[in-house]
Amino acid sequence: MEKTRLDKKLAQLRGKSYISRELIDLLDTVTHLHLDMRELAEIELPADNQLAPAEAVFQGVPLLGRGNFPYDARQAESLLDRMITLLRDAGGPLADGAAAVRAALDAGELRPDVLFRKFLEDDHEFFAPWAERMPEAPRTLSFLAFAALNPSIEAVARKLAEKLPDMKVTQSGTCPICGSLPLISSLENKEGFRQATCSFCRHQYRIRRLACPICGEDDQKKLTFFTVDEEPGFRVDVCETCKTYVKTIDFRNLDRVAVPILDDLDSLALDYVAANQGYKRATLSAWGF
Ligand SMILES: [Zn+2]
Ligand SMILES: [Zn+2]
């Protein structure tokens, strides 16, 4: 079922003029690979007493910070290898970046376990020199790390979701599992419940509809949204207090199903408009750009 939705969405993305065929082919391969690998990831969750207690989670403390996420090392290493090959075959700046990463791995200058740890810890200082080395595709290394770890991360999030206390809506806007900011949000059902998709673990959780998930502003005068005619079903929620925006999917009146990580790409046009109006995005896109 998840696969069917994915295929439908990929087919639709192929109609977008500003997304190259090479990129869609790459996403097609990667998203399917991730779907299969998620089921195979061998993960050992930390003991329950290592997780934040329910009272803390209600206060906005994540159940398990992203730096403490366990992962399947063997799977991640083999996936890293496959991802490097895929990027090299895709051509362009990403291919050059991937070749540089391969060379660094071969030379022992870069170690997969260190790379994975630094990614989980969100260590910008580690990634900064790599970004400088590949100015044409500065996020290649973090994309590779994320792509290699994604099945583990999602598998962990799914297991941890069962351990979350029953909270109707998170007050803070950050993911109750890992503490990251939302990638995108969507409006669901008649009541218009606002559901966020986590930028790191992809957990979906309910956030306050009329509040900025980044800074918590809930003064209605500071919160607005805009839409563009070319992209029906999407809107951009902006906050005048922190000047950030979060895109929101609203397919309630459209015959479309949401696949947030791809809808994020589908609605790229809105990111350009938001940037032109001086708003910044709180998180990178699902694909690291
Ligand atoms: Zn999360
Ligand atoms: Zn705000």
Image (tube, grey):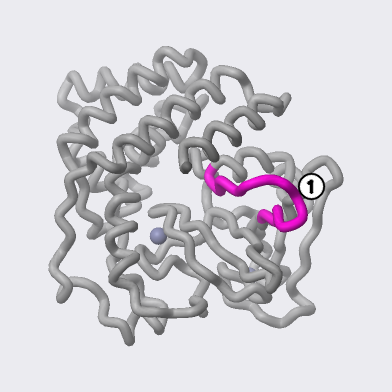
Image quadrant of ligand 1?
Answer: bottom left
Give me the residue at 48% from left, 13% from top.
Answer: 91
The magenta span reads: 249-261
**Image x and y of residue 170, in percent:** 49, 76
Q: Quadrant of residue 51?
A: bottom left
Give me the residue at 29% from left, 50% from top.
Answer: 155
Is residue 129 visible in this depiction of the protein?
no
Look at label 1 and name its amino acid: Pro
**Image x and y of residue 11, in percent:** 62, 28
Q: Is residue 19 left or right of residue 120?
A: right
Is residue 211 visible in this depiction of the protein?
yes
Q: Is residue 81 left or right of residue 205?
A: left
Q: Quadrant of residue 222?
A: bottom right
User: Which residue is the site of mark 1?
Assistant: 232
Relative to 241, say whether 233 is above or below. Answer: above
Local secondary structure at mark 1: loop
**Image x and y of residue 241, in percent:** 68, 72
